[in-house]
Image (tube, helix red, strand yellow):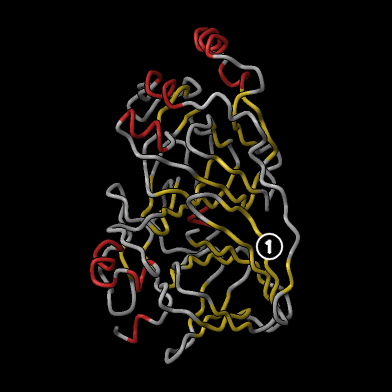
Amino acid sequence: MDATLHMPILLEPMYKEYIWGGDRLLHEFHRRLNPGIYAEAWEISDHPDGRTRILNGPDAGATLSEAIARRGPDLLGNGRTDKTFPLLVKIIDARETLSVQVHPDDDAAARLGGEAKSEMWYVLSSTPDAHIYSGFKPGVTPADFEKARAAGTIPALLQRFRALPGMVFNTPGGRIHAIGAGCLLLEIQQDANTTYRLYDWDRLDKEGRPRPLHVEQALRAINWDLTDSPVAPIQPRIPQPAGHAVRLVLDSPHFHVEEWTLTAPCSITHDSSSFLILFPINRNVRIRTPGQPAMILQRRSTCLLPAILDSFLIQPAESDGEAVRLLVTRRP
């Protein structure tokens, strides 16, 4: 094993322009971008619709699947045999409300030929009136949906939730949903890009045409029993060694997400069963790995720690005493 893999991996995001996107990625994230609309930043992706490339280390210039072919379990985790990276991490800036849509779960994807996609959203910031639509109201039936579709009133059947910073929404495949205007989210999802639109608010694309809907597939993909609240409960913080506390954000079959709070240097060890994805929410962090110079990871940016990197030191980059919060994602 090349010892230089014992370091955080930085990737070049892929930016997506969709008609509902905004400009907060341009103005709030201090990224070198030309003026324009940036609906999504695919921070870590090995999907054919937007592969991110590695910027540093021995695999610089490679896609994740190319690095996996070279590194295998050293990158993914002990016993992992994936040929491509299993997760996709995005930042979403919704200037307008997204379409009412659904993604297939594993069973529906097998039936319909799409890609299974379960996801979660962490609200980074939001306007005062920002909401998330997620799941039908209890008791809604397919017959109710058909009546609403004919009348153009589908949103009236959906549960609607305030979107406040720090809230977490769990959206498994099969759950109907729409991200509301004013939401800035971090999305963690399966490596998939299958979306079935049911309703698009009667808007037109750049050519003045309605965007295509996928009603037949969507109706076959919807899980009508997913009417519980999608809002993940806030778990208590569990103190770790001095300067470090952890709380569970979401534990799903596809990803395990924690929020770490750091106030001092912390030495981290783990069992190398999975890679780790780090995303500082509010402050810059400094990461030091064995035999490598320290790296500053800026707030609201993303890095990948290879599974073989089983120990590292992490601390707030500034010494003013303010705590750093960061999301840490791994495979279950």
Task: Estimate the x, y position of residue 167 in percent, counting from the top left.
Answer: 67, 49
The amino acid pointed to by label 1 is Arg
Residue drawn where x is 68% and y is 35% of the image: 161
Task: Estimate the x, y position of residue 224 in percent, counting from the top left.
Answer: 55, 23
Q: Nearer the viewer, residue 60 or 143?
A: 143
Figure check: 289 above or below 156: below
Extreme residue toward the front, this view: 79
Figure check: 53 above or below 314: above
Q: Tally the marks.
A: 1
Q: Would residue 7 be found to the left or right of residue 119 on screen?
A: left
Q: Which of 156 and 128 is in front in this view?
A: 156
Q: Nearer the viewer, residue 198 or 98?
A: 198
Task: Estimate the x, y position of residue 79 in percent, counting from the top left.
Answer: 36, 66
Q: Residues within 10 Å of mark 1 (few under 14, many from 20)?
A: some
Extreme residue toward the bottom, this view: 291
Q: Would residue 63 be found to the left or right of residue 316 on screen?
A: left
Callout 1: SS: strand
Task: Estimate the x, y position of residue 233 in percent, counting from the top left.
Answer: 71, 48
**In terms of image quadrants, where is residue 57?**
bottom left
